[in-house]
Image (cartoon, rainbow, N blue to C red):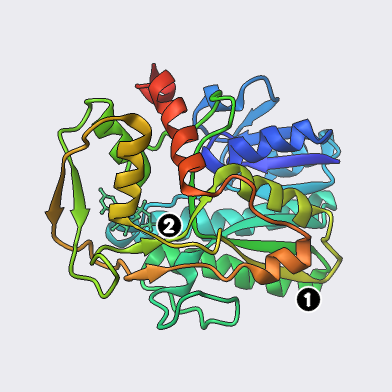
Amino acid sequence: MNILVTGGAGYVGSHAARLLTREGHRVVVYDNLERGHAAAVLDLPLVQGHLSDRELLARTMREKQIDAVMHFAAFALVGESVTDPNLYYENNVVGSLRLLQAMRDAGVTKIVFSSTTATYGEPEKSPIAETTPQHPINPYGYSKLAVEHLLTDFAAAYGIGFAALRYFNASGASADGVIGEDHRPESHLIPIVLQVALGQREKISIFGDDYPTLDGTCIRDYIHVDDLGSAHLKALNQLQPGKGLKLNLGSGVGYSVREVIDMCREVTGHAIPAAIGPRRPGDPPALVADSSLAQRTLGWQCCYSDLRTIVTSAWNWHRAHPQGYGG
Ligand code: UDP
């Protein structure tokens, strides 16, 4: 298929674009490079543009004879979404609306969308199945949930086929170390811990050790970015006109912040000093996926999401690219 990958210069999008190419699809990356990195696109064709540019989107889809869209382009910093919600509603919601309009202009009817566990907010029970009520607790979560609603309504009224894939904690890097994770600023646990191992930070601050978990630190479900990619590929093949899939993507295994730091110590051989800091507002104690619906529906399972493989792949990339894509 000819696939337009929005946000293909970003972390998850760049890994998925590469996977799609390897599977014989023809990818066109659409990215404004505001937060993504041209270097992450490698040698794939890149159209530099904004999601707000409906005309350019539609023209690109027509000219490249696009069959389906994978929509990764979004802002994804929870804290920033609280201080600047306008940015999030504009880029994530209005941007996605423009993309859907452009799809209609160009007659493209298939889309796979990056949704998030943040649409669930602070669920009372873990593991989290798709039946868990979605009550986001920040504008980022709301912006992604709004797009899920847009997709649902566009499917019912205009016949698009979609999958909204709710990621848990995307992590790791490509096995060959060619592309990896580089957010500016970095806020994610594993890259920050590895920056300590690289001597770029003095210590890792653990955001709270008084949670009701075994060791008092928060538990998350880390899923390798290439396992996310393979789920996208499988979802693409299941899209049906007028219908939507809404699926959790996680490994189903939770690790505490302390366990992640310990694994980073083991993999890097670095002592990685840690200090207990205050809780980060809005952090639920435990978020672990029940991904059994995705497994059944897509015939998919995680292959790289054990914590050692995740951390080893991330370490290989960070070690080889200590300045990320800037070095
Ligand atoms: N975390 C931490 N110190 C950091 C960054 C993150 O203790 O410097 C914790 C955070 O509170 C959460 C977990 O690590 O419990 C994963 O955070 P991350 O930002 O990577 O992903 P999130 O779960 O927020 O999407």
Q: Name the residue under label 2.
A: 88
Q: In which quarter of the image is the C terminus?
A: top left
The correct choice, above or below, for 132 with respect to 210 in the image is: below
Tell me which amino acid carries mark 1.
Ala
The correct choice, above or below, for 37 with respect to 159 in the image is: above
> Percent from the top left, x then y, of residue 299?
78, 60
Is the CB of mark 1 within 8 Å of ligand 1? no
Q: Say whether residue 278 is visible.
A: yes
Q: Quadrant of ligand 1?
A: bottom left
- Secondary structure under tag 1 reads helix
- Crowding around mark 2 (Cα neighbors within 10 Å: few <14, some 14 to 19, many 20+) is many
Tell me which amino acid carries mark 2.
Tyr
Residue at x-position 70% and y-position 25%: 45
Residue at x-position 47% and y-position 74%: 120
The correct choice, above or below, for 183 with respect to 223 in the image is: above
Is the CB of mark 2 within 8 Å of ligand 1? no
Q: Say whether residue 321 is visible.
A: no
Q: Quadrant of residue 304?
A: top right
- Secondary structure under tag 2 reads helix
> Percent from the top left, x then y, of residue 308?
46, 42
User: Depth check: 228 or 212 in front?
Assistant: 212
The correct choice, above or below, for 242 with respect to 131 in the image is: above
Residue at x-position 77% and y-position 31%: 22
Residue 156, numbered circle? 1
Tally of numbered discs: 2
Please tell me which of labels 2 and 1 falls first in the chain: 2
- Crowding around mark 1 (Cα neighbors within 10 Å: few <14, some 14 to 19, many 20+) is some
Label 2 and label 1: CA atoms lie apart by 25 Å
Residue at x-position 68% and y-position 41%: 5
Looking at the image, residue 29 sits to the left or right of residue 59; the answer is left
> Percent from the top left, x then y, of residue 39?
53, 22
Q: In which quarter of the image is the N terminus?
A: top right
